[in-house]
Amino acid sequence: MSSGRRRNSRAENPISAELARPIRLVVFDVDGVLTDGGVYVGGSTGDEGRSSVPYVEFKRFSIQDGFGMKMLMWAGIEVAAVSGRVSEATALRMAELGVAECHQIEGAYKVPVVAELLERKGLRWAEVAMLADDLPDMAVFERVGLRAAVRNAVPQISRLAHWRSKLEGGHGAAREFTDALLTAQGTLDSVADAYVAARSGSHLAGN
């Protein structure tokens, strides 16, 4: 039985080498891309039924997705997470992965954030890839050189995408994309081999 959550061969879903070649920065949306879009909220209530303490938010992230993001960085590709929601869980996970460019802004005004990042890094929109799922991503998505959508993306995003994952957001879609991008750039095997060799006694971080 097929499933959007089952691991698929990356070779079955390639990215065009022509589109992949210029990419030097990958922008990831968070909710619905690095997570399944769900949020677990907990807290306590006071005598009148209202929350007496700030609520606690939990998110589920894929370890394999995180490892794929680290592989991009080992290959010399910049990685950024840009979210339209402010979440401590997101900040903690990106810090754990070493993703310094973690930008969380209320209201999903993502273009100014990414434009400032490009100016600071000396990059052009054509050198950017984005993995997206929903309308808050659209303004950035339509500007980048490589547009990638998760399987569960809304139709407006899917229609614009150069590449679509076979897996759903939060369930391996990001790893599917990172492997496909590195394969198209011809660096996946060398990065993987370097990691495996280094695990016999080196400093590469975990996932």
Image (cartoon, rainbow, N blue to C red):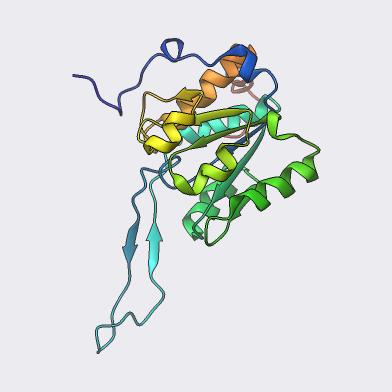
Q: Position of residue 22 (x, y in %)?
A: 70, 22
Residue at 36% across / 43% down in the picture?
36
Pick whichever, 51 or 84, lies toward us.
Answer: 84
Q: Is residue 197 above or below residue 50?
A: above
Give the number of marks: 0
Q: Residue at x 71, y 27 (%)?
A: 76
Figure check: 196 above or below 112: above
- Of all residues, the one furthest to the bottom in this rendering is 47
Q: Is residue 101 visible?
A: yes
Q: Residue at x 57, y 45 (%)?
A: 139
| Figure quadrant of residue 99 | top right
**Image height of 150 relative to 40, above or below:** above
Q: Quadrant of residue 74?
A: top right
The extreme left residue here reads: 1
Q: Position of residue 75 (x, y in %)?
A: 67, 24
**Against 108, is 18 above or below?**
above
Figure quadrant of the N terminus:
top left
Q: Mark yes or no: residue 193 visible.
A: no
**What x and y, as percent, mark residue 156?**
42, 37
- Relative placement, left or right, of 116 versus 190 is right
- In the rendered image, residue 174, in percent from the top left (x then y), is placed at 47, 31
Q: Nearer the viewer, residue 111 or 204?
A: 111
